[in-house]
Amino acid sequence: MVSIIERQLKHAALEAQEYVHLTASTFVGFFTRPFYRHDIIEQLDLIGFGSLTVVLLAGLFTGMALASQTGLTLDQFGARPVVGRLVSASMVKELGPVLTALMLTGRIGSGIAAELGSMVVTEQISALRALGTDPIRKLVVPRVLAGIVMAPALTIVSDFIGILGGWVIARYQLQVNTSLYWASVTKGLYITDAWMGITKPFVFGFLIVTIACHVGMRTAGGTAGVGHSTTLSVVAGSVAVIAADFFVTQIFIGLFY
Amino acid sequence: MTTETALTAKQILSEPGAPAVVFDHVELAFDEKAVLRDVSFSLVKGHTKIILGASGSGKSTSLKIIVGLLKADGGVVWVNGHRVDQLTERELMDVRSDLGMIFQEGALFDSLTVRENVGYKLYEETDLPLDQIDRRVEEVLGFIGLTEHIDKMPSELSGGQRRRVAIARAISFRPSIMLYDEATTGLDPITAVTVDDEMIKLRDLERVSSIIVTHQLRDAFYVAEHMAERAPDGSVRIVPATRAKEREAEFIMLRDGVIIFEGDADALRASADPYIREFLT
């Protein structure tokens, strides 16, 4: 029993050490040559534009459902006209960043883990090293950079489309006047909310991609190992996003509210 | 190292008969399991070392140590005058620029075309002009007879073609040492011979030193006992090797991480060791 616990602890410590090593090497790769510009552009396209549809759909339906649900609750207090305030605050501070991050974990995290995992089991990573290429600079740095840049951009898109979806429901289902809705949207937002809403996706983007790269690069056990890595990347990424959301929120509340 | 000493070392290494790779009492274990135990051998420039052994005997591990993908627990490894067991990953890049490695199954980059695979190192890691790289890629693919497949993806190639493209990728930057890890395993005999011929051509026409890891005896003896020569019309022929040429190919037999035989093809055939006898039959 003790040996099992000891083995688990050693394994956890090794994973943590390897993750820190990967992130440290990635940071070094941000600022030192060689840079693989073509790969960075390709990843910006894959992670950013490639995820646009899923993020737009998630944002739109979330905003619409939010307006619909909160409209019913607000009716009990005769506060239907302030539905925009609720939608905007919820989307910008919480739902936009978290749902976008979860969508990215499913789409990007799994894809990165599967791709890198396949490269490991087919010895393509070893071949890269043998050809004189550092796999972290070639594969990890472009993906992490793209994740950090594109997660906030996609979140802004998701926030906007969610608020727009809320307007559709407010206008045509709840019969709230358009100018009243948009005035309520802007009244419900403070600059601190915007900061919180834009800081979170930076953290999430970094976490999702570094976890996926770490899990993918540590793949072992052939094709079954690739499947395991893909699942692990989504699970670990999702949990990390939700946990990080709590901690970033606490930090902002502690600092600004 | 002073400039004078470095120069002397360079001169010694450039002489015929100088060692390209030296394995000196190398040890490696994964957890409790010893993979290599006190393994020592050297590869002379332009010669061939063929490492035989059953699966798990430490053959592929030896190649990975030479190229720096694995670090030995003990012993010394020299490659072209560099102690690779002491170098950092960044320092190893210089050593690797003179090493070509063929992995099991080829390890081609499946998102890149044949052209991009073969020219990978030149496109990504050098500042050479694109037209010069393209010419080199076409030249190398011509050497292995796959020019017509230049724009195909690896998934469109047969197993033998993939291995040959892997060889083309490894020789595109003109390394002086080639490491073949089970380059013919899983191929039919006819296709395997085409890969063997490429190894022979590289060794005899380009003077590339080779370490061949395999458990395919037929391929091992074929490479050791044949040589490439250029006919007056410029064509290349694979012919039975002269006695002197045969002696340039040495066999090593590994068993559970220990060298149990070292010698030429005739000595291997004549060995009375029961394990070797069983392996050969």
Image (cartoon, coloured by chain):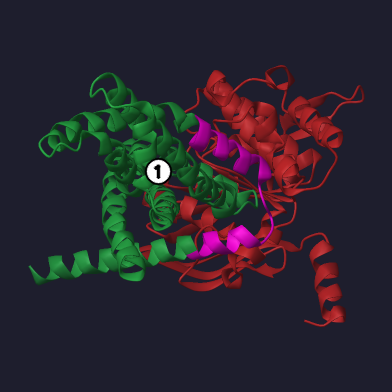
Chain colours: A green, B red
| Residue furthest right in the image | B232
Q: Around disc 1, counting alpha carbons within 10 Å, would you say few (fewer than 14), some (14 to 19), or many (20 or more)?
A: few
In the picture, measured across the screen, residue B10 lies left or right of residue A257, that is right
The quarter of the image holding the N terminus of chain B is bottom right
Q: At 37% from the left edge and 43% from the top edge, which residue is drawn?
A: B278
- At x 34%, y 28%, the residue is A167
Residue nearest the observer in this picture, B11 or B127 = B127
Q: Which residue is mark 1?
A: A186
Q: Amino acid at mark 1?
A: Thr
Q: At which x and y percent is residue B79?
A: 67, 63
Element type at marker 1? helix
Q: Is residue A107 visible?
A: no
Question: Which region is colored magenta?
Answer: A24-49
**A82 to the left or right of A131:** left
Q: Main structural element of the magenta stretch: helix, strand or loop?
A: helix
- In the image, residue B218 above or below residue B101: above
Does the magenta run of residues contain A39?
yes
Whether residue A108 sits left or right of residue B242 in the image: it is left
Image quarter of residue B128: top right
Q: Nearer the viewer, residue B72 or B127?
A: B127
Q: Nearer the viewer, residue A17 or A188?
A: A188
Residue B113 in percent (x, y) is at: 63, 27
Report x, y in % for residue B171: 72, 41
Residue B281 falls left or right of residue B247? left
Q: Chain of mark 1?
A: A
Residue A138 covered by magenta stretch: no
